[in-house]
């Protein structure tokens, strides 16, 4: 039995601006946001989980590098929210294209668009919720967000390739496709694009204060605020979460393993040459804030244990469990004079939540690798 | 043309690589369900809601253009990014996480947008009334705009 195809689509749209010029104008900004988001995301992935061949080549400078790129990652993702919604609004009538499928090629093209839309919505949704540490889904966030990033970037590239003639024909105000559209839509479209731009500005300004401390007063919707912290700095993993207590630290000593192993009490560490550095904590969730740290250079500690100028470090935290309990530090981080085993933060002894008695602070690294409650340092 | 084909092929390759990473995850069908769910929620819920607002406004004789439309876009976008902290169940991990009064900030922002839009509409009405009594100026031909 053959079902007769209805003569027309179930829904028709009479509203203006569902045209290729609107889609091109918004799509350009959306494409840029996704490109920045993808590049900074892949960079963050390799900084956080470097493959062996890369570990010793990761640069420790510029010291603000990760703060900038991860701030951009989250900001571009948030900016993409109004852009993606506006882009989908512009092309929504195409969902009801009639007939739904014209040919095998047409079916494949529609399938690739479905993958693009699904992956794009999924990335912005999971990424935004992750910054709020809200995980309502039954899968692991990091590997899935990473995998779908490749899917969405590939689907976007394919989409641009397929739509290229239309994009080119509507790229400027004087392009032939743009000129063929009703001229009366021009002012209306400009106003719509102004509204979308205003939305991008609004979502950016009300969240970016979590990474740009100077804009902290405008921070209305971000999961972190530079104004809220312990010793002037937000905390991610607390001592309670890591099950570290003052009592468990009684008799603490730093063990340094290497060709000439040794151990130091906190007083002995304090008696070593102290250095003060100003470095940011920059979290993978996007927030970051600079602070003043005082402590002993990691390279001095490694050298005393017999580590040469090429020595790398392995740092073990006192916490019982945790994905980042053992942290490896490539050569360029370990030998950077800015990399400290910090004992003080903003002029006070470290609080327990910031890693008392001693924590790592290194330039240009994700916050989760700035190991707190350090118990052992190894020359690798 | 060659460049287009190369870009398309690159895109396909990246998609295959991403899909390969996905199927290696435990229970990949659950991920597929969430991907499909994202489209279903947008295409079946969010978009129809937006179009319904437009249709209702049109039925009420309102033209959603210019500043009022921009205000709705801004308010909707801010609401979208404010929903996670507003709806997230459970307490924050520590006092420095989710430290803001998100409900107050959202209400204040929405109120500010509403007040500014109403002020604009009021000023426009006053200006138009004043304009009607003033001598007419020759209409300027519309510029071609984006």
Image (cartoon, coloured by chain):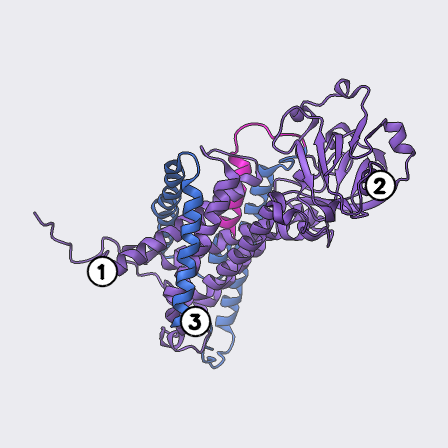
Chain colours: A purple, B blue
Farthest residue, direction bottom = B138
Q: Quadrant of the C terminus of chain A?
A: top right
Residue drawn at the location 72% of the way across and 48% of the way down? A213
Q: Label 2 is found on which chain of the structure?
A: A
- In the picture of the structure, the residue carrying the numbered disc 1 is A103
Mark whose residue sits in front, 3 or 1: 1
- In the picture of the structure, the residue carrying the numbered disc 2 is A300
What secondary structure prevails in the magenta region? helix
Q: Could one spot residue A217 in this view of the protein? A: yes
Query: Of A117 and B125, which appears nearest the observer?
Result: A117
Mark whose residue sits in front, 1 or 2: 2
Residue drawn at the location 40% of the way across and 34% of the way down? B27
Q: Relative to A92, does residue A216 appear above or below in the rendering?
A: above
Q: Label 3 is found on which chain of the structure?
A: A
Residue A186 has which mark? 3
Label 3 SS: helix
Residue B74 has which mark? none
Residue drawn at the location 41% of the way across and 52% of the way down? B15
Farthest residue, direction front = A259
A63 with respect to B49 (left or right)? right
Q: Quadrant of residue A23?
A: bottom left
Tell me, yes or no, whether the two marked residues, 2 and 3, touch with CB atoms within 8 Å.
no
Mark whose residue sits in front, 2 or 3: 2
Q: Position of residue A305 (x, y in %)?
A: 82, 36
Tell me, yes or no, whether the two marked residues, 3 and 1, touch with CB atoms within 8 Å.
no
Q: CA distance from mark 3 to mark 1?
A: 34 Å
Q: Is residue B94 magenta?
A: yes
A26 with respect to A260 (left or right)? left
A91 with respect to A318 (left or right)? left
The magenta segment: B74-95
Query: Of B102 and A361, which appears nearest the observer?
Result: A361
């Amino acid at each position: 039995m053959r079902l007769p195809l209805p003569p027309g689509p179930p829904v028709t749209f009479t509203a203006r601006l569902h045209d290729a010029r609107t889609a091109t104008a918004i799509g350009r900004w959306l494409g840029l946001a996704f490109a920045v988001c993808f590049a900074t995301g892949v960079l963050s992935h390799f900084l956080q989980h470097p493959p062996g061949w890369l570990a010793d080549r990761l640069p420790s400078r510029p010291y603000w590098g990760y703060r900038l790129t991860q701030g951009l990652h989250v900001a571009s993702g948030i900016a993409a929210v109004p852009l993606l919604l506006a882009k989908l609004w512009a092309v929504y009538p195409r969902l009801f294209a009639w007939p739904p499928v014209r040919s095998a090629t047409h079916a494949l093209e529609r399938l690739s668009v479905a993958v693009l839309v699904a992956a794009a919505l999924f990335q912005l949704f999971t990424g935004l919720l992750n910054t709020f540490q809200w995980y309502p889904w039954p899968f692991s966030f990091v590997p899935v967000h990473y995998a779908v990033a490749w899917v969405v970037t590939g689907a976007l590239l394919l989409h641009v390739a397929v739509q290229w003639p239309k994009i080119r024909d509507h790229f400027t105000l004087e392009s032939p496709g743009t000129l063929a559209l009703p001229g009366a839509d021009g002012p209306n479209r400009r106003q719509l694009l102004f509204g979308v731009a205003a939305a991008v500005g609004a979502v950016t300004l009300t969240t970016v204060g979590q990474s740009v401390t100077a804009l902290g007063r405008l921070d209305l919707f971000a999961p972190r605020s530079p104004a809220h912290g312990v010793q002037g700095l937000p905390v991610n993993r607390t001592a309670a979460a890591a099950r570290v207590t003052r009592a468990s630290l009684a008799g603490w000593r730093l063990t340094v393993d290497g060709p000439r192993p040794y151990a130091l009490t906190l007083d002995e560490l304090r008696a070593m040459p102290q250095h003060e550095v100003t470095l940011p904590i920059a979290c993978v969730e996007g927030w970051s804030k600079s602070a003043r740290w005082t402590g002993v250079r990691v390279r001095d500690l490694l050298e005393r244990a017999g580590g040469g100028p090429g020595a790398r470090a392995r740092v073990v935290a006192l916490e019982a469990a945790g994905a980042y309990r053992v942290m490896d530090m490539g050569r360029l981080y370990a030998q950077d004079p800015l990399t400290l085993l910090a004992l003080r933060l903003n002029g006070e002894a470290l609080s327990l939540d910031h890693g008392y008695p001693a924590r790592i602070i290194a330039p240009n690294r994700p916050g989760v690798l700035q190991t707190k409650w350090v118990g052992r340092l190894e020359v690798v | 043309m060659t460049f287009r084909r190369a870009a398309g092929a690159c895109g396909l390759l990246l998609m295959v690589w991403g899909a390969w990473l996905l199927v290696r995850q435990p229970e990949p069908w659950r991920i597929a369900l969430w991907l499909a769910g994202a489209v279903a929620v947008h295409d079946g819920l969010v978009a129809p809601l937006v179009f319904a607002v437009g249709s209702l406004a049109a039925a009420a004789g309102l033209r959603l253009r210019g500043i009022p439309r921009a205000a709705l876009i801004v308010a909707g976008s801010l609401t979208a990014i404010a929903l996670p902290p507003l709806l997230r169940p459970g307490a924050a991990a520590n006092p420095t996480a989710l430290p803001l009064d998100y409900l107050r900030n959202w209400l204040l922002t929405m109120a500010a947008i509403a007040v500014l839009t109403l002020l604009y509409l009021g000023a426009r009405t006053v200006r138009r009334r004043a304009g009607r009594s003033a001598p007419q100026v020759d209409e300027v031909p519309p510029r071609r705009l984006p």
